[in-house]
Image: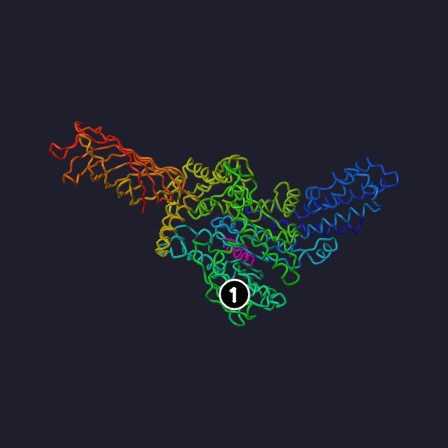
């Protein structure tokens, strides 16, 4: 018993230095380490004393008579006397708490098999829990970041806060004296001698690759406690739609300019050298080849087919693995994973970035590879990556300076498999010891309201495969993740998955909405910091540290890592309150700038949406813009500067649509029509319907030809008003003479009409009414015989904004009588017609250009 308590004292020494981990931004009341030590020591003494007392009694009850009711009472009493540290973490102390549950439930078969030594068993199970806790707290951290487009701002805020936590955690662990460290090891808590100040492995896809690189670099520098000065904030805050859509940015295969992205990444080259610290990390990123390279499945020769074609696979997803080493006042230098002096175990499948003989990989090559991993198809230009790969057909390394690469998230948006392999291939003592932070902003802590959709009527092909087709794209991107969980089921115990606690400003409009407004990006960044605070202090195992510190220091309980930001203090106060308006809180009341007011509005709107039980994936953007418009939100920057929130969707659709139209014009002439139709339908469905501003029509009618033009006057959502003007020429028998003769005639008509369009693309409907003027010419007499006026309605079906099919009823205002004052004769010949058609009906089809 005394030896156990001595070891408990060593464990307490570990936690006495944890106040440094939780230092709040403003100086609080001093934390008294002796009080913390006394509190924790008392808790652990209580646990061991309870095990000694109740365990000894239970051993006596497990004799031949087996008094089950008394045994259950003792087990229940022992559970109630255990500190919250144990009872509140069943995943760490599952064996200890499971044994007590068994004893409480009194299953006779299980109890009869219990042997003497229950105290020893319970103490050993407590030790197992402490060992597991040490693994969780001291494991080298690895990061997996998925793609997210403009949600990269949110990811950046989360990772900024979390990297600060890792830095502080490392300082705490390093402060443990060697003697105490050895005692902790004998107790079962294994902690690293030289804990890293940041992530040791980072992997990412798409925008996640950029944030993975930033997270790795953050572990190599002195911590920046002001969020707006951090690498993360300054990288993402500059990525605005007006910079991505610069004049001339549209090319034959991309819409956005890559220059702002490269400028943001290359800012890492200009960092103050004095800020660099000793560090080591490994970086993995997925990319996608535009043209696959062949992998010979039968390289070994014993499976190779003897004749004909060899069995080869096309590899499109490429994974680049690097290791970087940095020192004091010297930026990290990159080598192939797992290090410049180590032999890579993955040569057959994994390419290597180009590097000079005997030197590190140039930073330009590294940054270019990261940019390629985030080159979303059609948005950013595919990038050429200078690399070499092992050609299984020849058994030689091949230099490749021409292959182009795009977004790595196309086939592998969640590269957990890559992080896991890198952990298994790492050099000792890191090999296989990592704990993985799996960060995907789509993981939320609420349930979306179910969508009101009608399934396809069945039985039938679409009804059979509806769910499969709907989930095809997402399943393809996460296929590697599912394979990893299948082949490595135990890895789930080493994964932490943070969740998002509120709607964001950047999750709309194809996840690009944060690019439209600087305040959107600021809000999402700080919202990420709040969710990291949730994760560190409330949801992951590190929350135990904060809980224990709070118990020991009730006057000033530390709840956060040190961050110097009044805006974040406001966010944190609002998160811990039940208020609907952040401005009502003292921590937020002093934020009076225009920027802060917009961010406060976003905070209030996000909370309102979070409380809405009817919020769904289909209506969340509409609720978002309506709530902002109600508050009078006005954009301060970017393409929407000076406009209200109601203009958000339409402006984005217009700007992005114009860029896609320019992209269409960059395509070969033979492909422009199909490309233009397809992209417009995609944008209309994914963002918002945008009417064709102006079209010209060439068509055929029942008996003639038609030419027309039509500008759009106004539209709201999928409804619009158009003006249309045109001429028609037809050959028929619409003029009827008295006496029943019906000579053939040419009719020429001009009309002006208004039309109301509605319905979702690709099939839309239009209904209109207009005024028509018609003149009839009779070739037999060589005379124009009549000028008539009519009201003409129209009912049209329009497919893909191009093909038009119409039905036009017509009512002549002269009633078909030559005596009508609305009849205008063009000849005084006694043979002039006296009777006409009073009604008309025209069928037509045409193509809109």
Say whether residue 280 is visible. Answer: yes
Q: Count all numbered tags in the image, as a single digit.
A: 1
**Residue 105: horizontal and vertical position, in percent?**
77, 37
Among all residues in the image, which is located at the extreme right? 64
Q: In the image, 444: left or right of 801?
A: right
Circle 1 SS class: strand
Q: How is the image coloured?
A: rainbow
Residue 753 or 268: which is nearer the viewer?
753
40 to 235, vertically: above or below: above
Based on the picture, tell me whether residue 218 belongs to the magenta stretch: yes
Q: In the image, 19: left or right of 781?
A: right
Mark 1 burial class by Cα count in 10 Å: few <14, some 14-19, many 20+: many
Q: In the image, 78: left or right of 629?
A: right
**Residue 800: horizontal and vertical position, in percent?**
38, 44
Based on the picture, tell me whether residue 486 belongs to the magenta stretch: no
**Residue 481: horizontal and vertical position, in percent?**
58, 52
- Magenta residues span 207-223
The residue that label 1 is drawn on is: 353
Residue 368 or 311: which is nearer the viewer?
311
- Quadrant assignment, res 319: bottom right
Residue 228 or 672: which is nearer the viewer?
672
Magenta region's main secondary structure? helix
Say whether residue 211 is visible. Answer: no
**Residue 307: horizontal and vertical position, in percent?**
57, 68
């Amino acid at each position: 018993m005394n030896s156990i308590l001595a070891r408990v004292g060593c464990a307490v020494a570990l936690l006495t230095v944890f106040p440094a981990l939780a230092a709040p931004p403003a100086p609080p009341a001093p934390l008294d380490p002796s009080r913390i030590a006394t509190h924790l020591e008392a808790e652990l003494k209580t646990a061991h004393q309870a095990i000694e007392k109740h365990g000894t009694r239970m051993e006596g009850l497990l004799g031949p008579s087996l008094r089950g009711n008394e045994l259950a009472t003792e087990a229940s009493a022992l559970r109630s006397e255990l500190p919250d540290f144990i009872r509140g973490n069943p995943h760490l102390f599952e064996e200890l708490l499971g044994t007590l549950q068994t004893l409480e439930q009194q299953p006779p078969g299980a109890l009869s098999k219990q042997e003497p030594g229950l105290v020893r068993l319970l103490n050993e199970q407590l030790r197992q829990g402490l060992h597991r806790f040490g693994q969780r707290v001291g494991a080298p951290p690895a990061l997996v970041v998925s793609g997210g487009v403009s949600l990269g701002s949110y990811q950046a805020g989360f990772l900024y806060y979390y990297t600060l936590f890792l830095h502080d955690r490392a300082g705490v662990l390093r402060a443990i004296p060697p003697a105490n460290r050895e005692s902790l090891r004998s107790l079962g808590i294994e902690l690293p001698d030289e804990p890293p100040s940041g992530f040791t492995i980072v992997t990412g896809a798409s925008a996640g690759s950029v944030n993975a690189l930033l997270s790795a670099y953050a572990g190599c520098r002195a911590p920046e406690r002001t969020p707006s000065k951090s690498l993360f904030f300054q990288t993402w805050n500059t990525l605005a739609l007006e910079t991505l859509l610069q004049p001339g940015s549209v090319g034959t295969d991309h819409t956005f300019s890559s220059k702002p992205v490269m400028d943001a990444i290359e800012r890492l080259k200009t960092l103050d050298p004095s800020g660099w610290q000793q560090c080591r990390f490994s970086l993995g990123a997925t990319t996608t080849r535009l043209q696959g390279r062949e992998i010979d499945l039968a390289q070994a020769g014993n499976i190779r087919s003897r004749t004909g074609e060899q069995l080869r696979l096309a590899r499109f997803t490429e994974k680049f693995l690097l290791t970087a080493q940095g020192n004091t006042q010297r930026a990290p230098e990159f080598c192939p994973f797992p290090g410049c002096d180590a032999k890579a175990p993955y040569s057959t499948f994994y390419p290597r970035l180009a590097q000079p003989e005997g030197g590190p990989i140039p930073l330009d090559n590294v940054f270019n590879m990261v940019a390629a991993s985030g080159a979303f198809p059609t948005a950013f230009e595919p990038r050429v990556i200078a690399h070499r790969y092992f050609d299984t057909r020849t058994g030689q390394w091949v230099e490749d300076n021409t292959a182009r690469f795009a977004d790595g998230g196309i086939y592998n948006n969640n590269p957990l498999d890559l992080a896991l392999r890198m952990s298994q291939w790492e050099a000792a003592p890191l090999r296989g010891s990592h704990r993985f932070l799996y960060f995907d902003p789509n993981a939320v802590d609420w349930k979306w309201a179910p969508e009101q959709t009608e399934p396809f009527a069945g039985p039938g092909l679409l009804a059979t495969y509806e769910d499969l087709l709907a989930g095809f794209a997402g399943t393809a991107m996460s296929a590697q993740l599912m394979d990893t969980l299948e082949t490595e089921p135990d890895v789930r115990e080493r994964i932490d998955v943070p969740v998002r606690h509120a709607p964001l400003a950047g999750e709309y409009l194809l996840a690009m909405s944060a690019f439209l407004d600087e305040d959107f990006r600021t809000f999402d960044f700080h919202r990420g910091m709040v969710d990291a605070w949730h994760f560190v202090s409330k949801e992951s195992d590190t929350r135990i540290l904060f809980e224990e510190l709070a118990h020991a220091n009730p006057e000033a309980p530390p709840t956060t890592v040190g961050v110097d930001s009044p805006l974040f203090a406001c966010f944190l106060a609002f998160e811990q309150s039940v208020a609907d308006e952040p401005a009502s809180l003292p921590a937020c009341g002093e934020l009076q700038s225009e920027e802060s007011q917009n961010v406060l509005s976003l905070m209030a709107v996000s909370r309102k949406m979070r409380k809405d039980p009817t919020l769904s994936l289909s209506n969340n953007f509409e609720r978002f813009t309506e709530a902002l418009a109600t508050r009078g939100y006005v954009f301060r920057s970017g393409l929407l500067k000076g406009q209200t929130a109601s203009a958000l969707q339409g402006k984005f659709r217009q700007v992005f649509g114009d860029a896609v139209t320019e992209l269409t014009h960059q395509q070969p002439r033979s492909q422009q029509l199909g490309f233009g139709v397809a992209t417009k339908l995609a944008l209309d469905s994914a963002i918002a319907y945008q009417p064709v501003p102006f079209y010209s029509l060439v068509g055929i009618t029942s008996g003639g030809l038609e030419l027309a033009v039509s500008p759009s006057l106004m539209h709201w959502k999928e409804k619009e008003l158009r003006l249309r003007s045109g001429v028609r020429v037809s050959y028929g028998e619409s003029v009827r003479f008295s006496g029943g003769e019906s000579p053939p005639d040419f009719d020429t008509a001009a009309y002006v009409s208004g039309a109301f369009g509605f319905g979702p693309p690709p099939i839309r409907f239009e209904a209109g009414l207009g005024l028509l003027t018609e003149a009839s010419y009779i070739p037999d007499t060589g005379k124009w015989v009549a000028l008539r006026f009519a009201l003409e309605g129209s009912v049209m079906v329009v497919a893909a904004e191009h093909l038009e099919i119409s039905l036009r009823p017509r009512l002549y205002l002269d009633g078909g009588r030559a005596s009508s004052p609305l009849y205008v004769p063009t000849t005084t010949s006694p043979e002039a017609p006296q009777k006409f058609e009073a009604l008309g009906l025209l069928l037509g089809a045409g193509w809109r250009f």
